Amino acid sequence: MNDWYLIRHGETQWNAERRVQGHTDVPLHDVGREQAALTGRRLADIRFGAVYSSDLIRARETAEIIVAASNTGPYEIVFDERLREVSFGKLEGKTWTEMDDEIRAVQNERNLDFAPPGGESYRRMLDRLGEFAEMVRERHAHDDVLVVGHGAAFRALAVRMLGLPDETFWSLSGLRSASVSRVRRRDDGRTALFAWSDAGHLDVPPAERGAGILSHAHLTQ
């Protein structure tokens, strides 16, 4: 039996502005780094057999902050392009409202095979996340695994890990920044979702936070 801990990256300025990021390499801002530190504190005593991360900078930074807080490391982070967010092509940088308006102009229904100009279909993303899941299953059948990535990509990963129909992707809720989701794989091969977008650790009052974790008051000065 093993658990996969899926950590969405901390917040970026584009997240705060509700802009489409996709493959655009946007770093964490101060709040995002604080969120990653709080997530690292929550996971500090868990021993992982492997740590994987998307190679995009917002995920890389989140993974590096989490690993630095670990009491069970050190860990080498394996950066894998298959964990990237879906590419929105020429729509990246637009607000989500602008993007939705442009997509509705060319299609009225959700379609996993639709790809925006210069971008990637959700089906292609599901396939590459499925490839990643198969690789990790083979390499780490009995190890707990930490994976740092992105919201839509983790919805795709969960669908493929749980063996659900691809259309279930639309039914899974979005993930909060720096949240913890957990999928358990039993010895008989069955998988179950134990947590989804758990962000209770981000609501810790500043006075109770550990040394080295920035307070919100400091961030707003």
Image: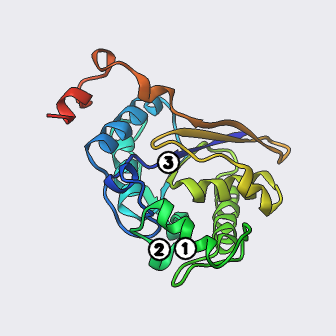
Give amino acid for label 1. Glu
Position of the C terminus, as image quadrant, is top left
Say whether residue 179 is left or right of residue 217. Answer: right
* First-in-chain label (2 vs 1): 2
Q: Position of residue 169 (x, y in %)?
A: 72, 57
Say whether residue 83 is left or right of residue 204. Answer: right
CB under 8 Å between discs 3 and 2: no
Q: Callout 2: helix, strand or loop?
A: helix
Residue 5 to residue 198: above or below: below
CA distance separating discs 3 and 1: 27 Å
Residue at x 36% of width, y 56% of height: 14
- The reply to whether residue 82 is visible in this rendering is no
Residue at x 51% of width, y 32% of height: 199
Residue 91's label in the rendered image is 2
Say whether residue 24 is left or right of residue 157. Answer: left
Residue 156 to residue 114: above or below: above
Instruction: Tell which residue pokes out farthest to the bottom in this image.
Output: 118
Q: Callout 1: helix, strand or loop?
A: helix
Q: Residues within 10 Å of mark 2 (few under 14, many from 20)?
A: many
Give amino acid for label 2. Leu
Q: Quadrant of residue 71?
A: top left
CB under 8 Å between discs 2 and 1: yes
Residue 8's label in the rendered image is 3
Q: Nearer the viewer, mark 3 or mark 1?
A: 1
Q: Callout 3: helix, strand or loop?
A: strand
Say whether residue 86 is left or right of residue 158. Answer: left
* First-in-chain label (3 vs 1): 3
Residue 102's label in the rendered image is 1
Q: Quadrant of residue 86?
A: bottom right
Residue at x 70% of width, y 65% of height: 130
